[in-house]
Amino acid sequence: MKTLKMKVGPYEFTVRMETDKAPETCRAFAKVLPFSGQMIHVRWSGEAGFLPLGDYDLGVDLEDPTSYPAPGEILFFPGGISECEILVPYGGACFASKAGQLAGTHFLTVVEGEHQFEELGQALLYDGAQYTEFSAPGSDR
């Protein structure tokens, strides 16, 4: 599996799994598909949404971590000084929490649907939480 579907509210995206840079994270994430949660706008990281996952444990450590994802470079943070989360930047972002700057694993990249980033950002800011689901291509979900 090289790509996944990501639905955020009414918006649909195709995302590529970054298996070369984050093989363990991609392998573990593929095992838990479909994966869903509520995406909300970030508080400290700039133009991004995130799925807060609390003490969720995917069973992976950081791989090739970054604090400065480009729009569409989706990060997984396994937790530690802040809660576990998935960060989805739609614009300029520096991954952070109330504890300070963080680094996450860039494990997915949006490859179709980027034209919806501005609308997604507006929806997260003004409409609130958006149901989000990652699933395999061709699934009915």
Image (cartoon, rainbow, N blue to C red):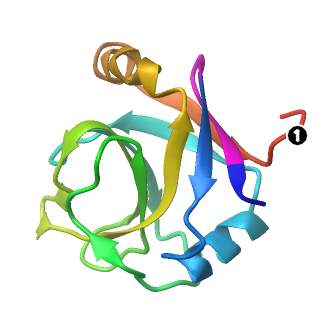
Horizontal relation, residue 85 to residue 132: left or right: left
Q: Is residue 8 magenta?
A: yes
What residue is rendered at 38% in x and 14% in y?
119
Quarter of the picture holding the C terminus: top right
Quarter of the picture holding the N terminus: bottom right
Horizontal relation, residue 37 to residue 27: left or right: left
Camera sees residue 20: yes
| Residue under label 1 | 139
Residue 10 percent coordinates (x, y): 59, 16
What residue is rendered at 28% in x and 21% in y?
125
Q: Secondary structure at mark 1?
A: loop
Q: Looking at this view, is 82 or 12 the one in front?
A: 12
Q: Considering the whole magenta stretch, tell me its main secondary structure.
A: strand
- Name the residue type under label 1: Ser
What residue is rendered at 30% in x and 13% in y?
126
Q: Is residue 117 above or below residue 60?
A: above
Quadrant of the rendered image containing residue 64: bottom left
Q: Is residue 35 above or below residue 48?
A: below
Horizontal relation, residue 63 to residue 108: left or right: left
Rate crowding at label 1 as few (under 14), some (14 to 19) or many (20 or more) other CA atoms within 10 Å: few
Q: Looking at this view, is 125 or 134 the one in front?
A: 134
Residue 135 percent coordinates (x, y): 75, 46
Span highlighted in magenta in the image: 4-11
Q: Is residue 88 magenta?
A: no
Residue 57 percent coordinates (x, y): 55, 76
Q: Looking at this view, is 100 or 7 the one in front?
A: 7
Camera sees residue 46: no
Q: Is residue 53 above or below residue 47?
A: below
What residue is rendered at 34% in x and 69% in y?
104
Residue 33 percent coordinates (x, y): 76, 57
Quadrant of the rendered image containing residue 40: top left
